[in-house]
Image (tube, helix red, strand yellow):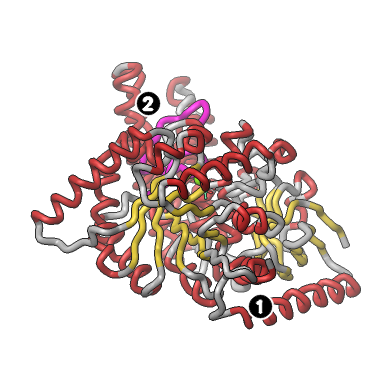
Amino acid sequence: MECIKGKGVARGIVMGKLLFSQRDRTNISKQKVEIPKEEYERYHRAKEKAKSQLEVLYEKALKEVGESAAQIFVIHQTLLEDVEYESHVKQMILEQGYNAEYAVNATSELFQDMFRNLEDEYIKERFSDVEDISKRLLDILFETKTELSGEREPVIICGDDFAPSETIQMDKNKILAICTRQGSASSHTAILAKTMNLPAVVACGEALEKFYDGKVAIVDGYDGIIYIDPDEETVKQLRMKRDDALKRKIHLQDLKGKESVTKNGQKVWVCANVGGLNDISRVKENDGEGIGLFRSEVLYLESSDYPKEEEQFLCYKKILQEMGEKKVIIRTMDIGADKKIDYFHLEKEENPALGLRAIRLCLERPEIFKTQLRALYRASVYGKLGIMFPMITSVEEVQEIKEQIDRVQQELSEEHIQFDKGVELGIMIETPAAAMISDLLAEEVDFFSIGSNDLTQYALAVDRQNQKLERYCNPHHLGVLRMIEMVVINAHSRGKWAGICGELAGDLTLTEYFVRLQIDELSVVPSMILPLREKIRSL
Ligand code: PEP
Ligand code: MG
């Protein structure tokens, strides 16, 4: 038996086979797929996406470096359409039944060799272009969910790290747990795993070797340990631990239907953080008192193009209907930083966490923002909607948002489309600037929701993604806690309510402190709702 120690970021104990992500290019696995036709369609979609990426690159190069340098992207587009390349890939997928990654890689190697063996020096060099387009195709293919398509049983997926877009696109029915070499507790991947109720162990380092691919392991998400080829005694111990956790879970069921209220009658709304419609059942199972944070960017991360107004409307409507009388706070999309999406064609940034992210992106691209606002307001008549905006730093931003909302409302009125004029509007307090001017911001909105993950990152100047900075990333830092206190006081002094939706909301060692601050709402991953209610009721 081997033990690998990492950081447990999402609780739970599971046993299963380890599957290493195919993204490690040095070892693209050769798999037979169940439905070659679907695999070929997946290849085709990747090809179309590669072509549109090349078009964007061509336009950009044309502007920045001129026609002749931009021609390379035209050559790459032509190569992508090469009949022989295409028919070789097609044959490997459709006739031989291989996975698209393997087919592209094998075809790429074959063609590179062919070019290298040519006499003509110029054409010979074209092997690097074949390599380039194949790499582009592979990058796109690796982002899609097929890593798991060959697997019949759910597996423990392992890799260096997974981007939020990759985590979202994983087929949840085929995953038991997520283990990564890198990653930090407050990374979006860890948060998404928690929301999806998947045990996760991050920051395992190089010990999580690809050599273990296919081996049976137990993942202990409580203590952050992976037991590879566990011996009988370990299996027994962990089974007991899992049973204890289960018993505790059953005991917590008694709290369903009860209020989250302290012994002296102070009420705290215990709501849920969710990423999509699939999470709603977990909110209900755990008796969430509402949704305090719906990360709407997940809708964008799951799509291969901008989600249309109608599609968004249907999604928001469904959530509101599902939650009935309970409040649903939808956060407008927080794209950017680590949440990158190809079709947004965002420019590469030196410091993405300090870049064009969240509300900034919405204000820079009002058409995208308007589509989301229209969908939200159209859905507002189906339940109790609140809308909040991420990454606010100034009063002017809030005023600009409100102007956009006015315009959207006006348009809807002109189109005779009903909407709820009383939708609560709030902002996330995630930047020190917002915390420091929360007295002024409170004049503009109905509520604050403190995003402690980003507030910690920006207050302490630590990249929340960087596992090596974990010891500096202390959300209990007095600098962070004082800001939270200031925000709550400022909200209350203007008659507004304040909640926390960052991970700190579920930190039971701080519940008493938050209750003393008279926090109005705490929004946590569904699995933390009942433990938090229990804690509040004990105070
Ligand atoms: C936060 O920053 O605390 C937050 C809730 O937003 P996210 O984690 O999605 O950035
Ligand atoms: Mg945030």
**Which one is in front, 270 or 337?**
270
Does residue 530 appear in the picture of this structure?
yes
The answer to which of marks 1 and 2 sits earlier in the sequence is 2
Q: Where does residue 194 sit, x and y in percent of width and height?
A: 60, 60
Q: Residues within 10 Å of mark 1 (few under 14, many from 20)?
A: some
Q: Choose mark 1 or mark 2, whichever is in front.
A: 1
Three-letter amino acid code at the position of disc 1: Leu
Give the quadrant of the N terminus.
bottom right
Question: Pointer 2: what residue?
Answer: 72
Q: Is residue 50 above or below residue 67?
A: below
Magenta extent: 332-353
Q: Where does residue 248 sit, x and y in percent of width and height?
A: 72, 77
Q: Where does residue 346 sit, x and y in percent of width and height?
A: 39, 35
For label 2, being within 8 Å of ligand 1 is answered no
Left or right for 259, reference 410: right
Q: Residues within 10 Å of mark 2 (few under 14, many from 20)?
A: some
Question: Pointer 1: what residue?
Answer: 252
**Which one is in front, 147 or 420?**
420
SS under mark 1: helix
Three-letter amino acid code at the position of disc 2: Ile
Left or right for 284, reference 509: left
